[in-house]
Image (tube, coloured by chain):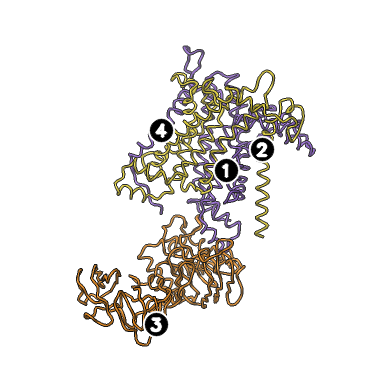
Amino acid sequence: MARIDLDIAHSYRANPQQDEDYALLPLKMSFADGGAYALLGPSGCGKTTMLNIMSGLLAPSSGTVKFDDIDVTQLSPQQRNIAQVFQFPVIYDTMTVADNLAFPLRNRKMPEDQIKKRVGEVAEMLELSGQLDQRAANLAADAKQKISLGRGLVRPDVSAVLFDEPLTVIDPHLKWQLRRKLKQIHHELKLTLIYVTHDQVEALTFADQVMVMTRGRSVQVGSADALFERPQHTFVGHFIGSPGMNFLPAQVDDQTLVVAGHKFGLPPGSALPEGELKLGIRPEYVTLTAADDRTALPVNITQALDIGTHVLLTGQCGDLAIKARLSPDQHAPACGDTVWFGVLGSHTCFYKNEELLP
Amino acid sequence: MITTKPVNQKAWWLVLPVVICVAFSAVLPLMTVVNYSLQDIFSPERRVFVGTEWFALVMRDEELHAALWRQLTFSLAVLTVEIPLGIMLALAMPAKGWKSSAVLVVVALSLLIPWNVVGTIWQIFGRTDIGLLGAMLQEMGYDYSYTGNGTHAWLTVLTMDVWHWTPLVALLCFAGLRSIPDAYYQAARIDGASKFAVFRYIQLPKMRGVLMIAVLLRFMDSFMIYTEPFVLTGGGPGNATTFLSQYLTQKAVGQFDLGPAAAFSLIYFLIILLLCFILYNWMQRVGTDSKEGSDHE
Amino acid sequence: MNENRFQKRTLFLILYIVFALLPIYWMVNMSFKTNEEILSSFSFFPQHFTWDNYKTIFTDPAWYDGYINSLIIVAINMAISITVALPAAYAFSRYSFIGDKHLFFWLLTNRMTPPAVFLLPFFQLYSTLGLMDTHLAVALAHLVFNVPLAVWILEGFMSGIPREIDETAYIDGYSFPRFFLTIFLPLIKAGVGVTAFFCFMFSWVELLLARTLTSVDAKPIVATMTRTVSASGMDWATLAAAGVLTIVPGAIVIWFVRHYIAKGFAMGRV
């Protein structure tokens, strides 16, 4: 187990000129020993690149990777003693399940009796005990992926275990179960786990700290709560939450805030700079207010969806669409109604150049 | 478990064209051969049914036994050289870029040369006076002569076959290797697998299908080899390179009548069939459900 | 260590390529010499460089017709092989039916019939049908070894395509022929390319059947080449030039399918 410090940049091209040439823009990050982390972002954002740099499958084009202050940038995955689980199951077809699990240990010349014990434990954890003597090739996809997970977890002394969207091929109900299993394993073994995914639910339920990435850049690192309440970047607002944050173009002129042609006083205690900015508010925090409320905008409801746990409203204000989530016990307006949405409050965030204003 | 295929007898309709084609170009001639093998033909009008007499005659032929033995040794040698060499070649071939394309084409060249030309090239190539191979061997102090020395002739035919056909094995294996996803190699690196373990547990199992085609094709074709040694050595010196099909042709054209030749043909066909059947079944079992033998290293 | 191993591999590859190219080089070398030079002395390069052998081939219809005939035969054979093999391979890869396993092996057995065995029956069969000395006769005879191989290779490629694709198409209301031609075929075009290459290869170089079934009009180049043996001895030089020219069409075909081969195929369950 180790603390991992990254100070890297990576490009698959020889001479990167502009930002677009980089798969991973220069970034610094520290993963604490024993932590559970998630790297969250859409496909192509550089998260797998980052994972492969950590495991040593890929050498960064510049910068260093340190494990407990030791520079490991040039070391192989084996020397780094790291485990990694891939998106699609990788199993050794000709071996039994037990031999598959034992493979990383045998390669490291662990005594056979210890291997047997360790394989037994891991198989127990992943509920593979009954299948140990079967040929791995004949199993279903999710059992194969469990074997892949098992090979990642079987070595007791690894620096960290890296997961690259490991649950893609798993059925939804099993997915949930396996995620809990991983969480449980994390508590038992105190391993450093780093988990790559594009699924926010997976990331937020699994990890203590989530790193949100887009276009080769890390835009925010924080707890689930922080990502939800104070997105540091409009991308985080968009990406996290369902639906994502509402962003309304706004302007500050002469100590007044103008949104969609409506004028508001500046929120108390905030020092918003003059000029263009964006107002961000989560649909969960949009409220129905009385007409002419000083924090609200008039909207024409164009869609009202009852999703059981809540009602999702879409309101049109000029050419802006604003989404709101109401609890089902509130009286929801119908399509075509004109109501007032409260958009200014303690949960409202302001962004300039896509970055959160303090 | 791999999902089982649905049962659908209508699928026969899809197979029918192939069956008709093959029946026309293989079964009809085969029936003719069977017909001949049971008769003594004096002329198209006068034929006598002789039952299994020709078969008995052929089976007792000492020279046939010798030819069969030579054939088996040769085919076995072909497999033991070409399969490992082909695998090694496939592993050494570059995977990407123009180098890959260039090597692929260069390696495949020998497959595209008509078989009689192959024999002719080697006939010159092996001559000590005007051929590169022969001249080189003589330069190195060997008293090489593929026309005078049986062992030399046999080795020359083998070398020619290796030169001619190893590319087939290599191309198939190369394609098999390229179908392995990168994740397997990455996982192996993470698991700390040695180069040998990567070969033994990833590359070899993934090449199983293509290797099976390669082994069967090479076995069948080497068992039926005719044109190349015929052109190169004419079966000699003595009988050193007279393999089965050449022996058959000699007999059919020279000494036998049609009947014994047909009987010989059938026996020949049955031998290949039997050997391929054994090989096919054995290879299907290797690496699938026989746990013993494949997991002990 | 990695570096070292890489070099060993490259060295092995270079050695093999030298081994592969030397006989071909010798043929090319011979094709630019005269017969007298070939037989009289040993030399790495032609001492009296000449294009005459190639000129002979390109000006004598007996020679260049051989190439045309060969190309026609191979084209017919490839077309028939692939056309009949496609539905059969689909059936083998998608359905079980009575006797499927036996049928599959039976198909393979046809590849095992030594051509020498069938020369006479073939001759009689095609004489009876009046097909002697036609392109079609040779193309049909070559089906014996190409169709089984084509079915085998295509089946391997098709097994790699998930069956859900078929089912989705049927649900979307595609008829079988339309589904097969517009959806399925593009998915396995790599397989078709590889199969075409193998059919080409085996049909292009086959001599015995081709020689037996043709005499003048449809005589393929391989058979034409055997006529260089004459009373005055072998015409080595022309034969070498003809040999060099036989490699060209195949090299073009493999250039076209190289990406399909380099993309890889595994022949999952055989």
Q: Is residue C128 above or below residue A229?
A: above
Q: Chain C is drawn in which colour?
A: yellow
What residue type is disc 3 on? Answer: Leu
* Label at residue B159: 2
Judged by depth in the image, the label closer to the viewer, 1 or 3, is 3
Q: Dot 2 lies on which element?
A: helix
Mark 4 or mark 1, which is nearer the start of the sequence? Answer: 4
- The alpha-carbon separation of the residues under discs 1 and 3 comes to 72 Å
In the rendered image, the residue lying farthest to the bottom is A269
Between the C-alphas of marks 2 and 3, the distance is: 85 Å
Q: Are marks 1 and 4 on the same chain?
A: yes
Q: Say which residue appears at 27% left-offset and 77% top-offset.
A: A297
Quadrant location of the C terminus of chain A in the rendered image: bottom left
Residue type marked 4:
Val
Q: In which quarter of the image is residue A8?
A: bottom right
Tell me if I can see residue B264 in this picture: no
Residue extending farthest front: A254
Between label 4 and label 3, give the one nearer the viewer: 3
From the image, tell me which residue sits under label 3.
A272
Q: Which amino acid does label 2 sit on?
A: Thr
Look at chain B in the picture and name its colour.
Answer: purple
Q: Chain A is drawn in which colour?
A: orange
Q: Which amino acid does label 1 sit on?
A: Val
**Do marks 4 and 3 share a chain?**
no
Tell me residue A173's x, y (percent): 35, 65
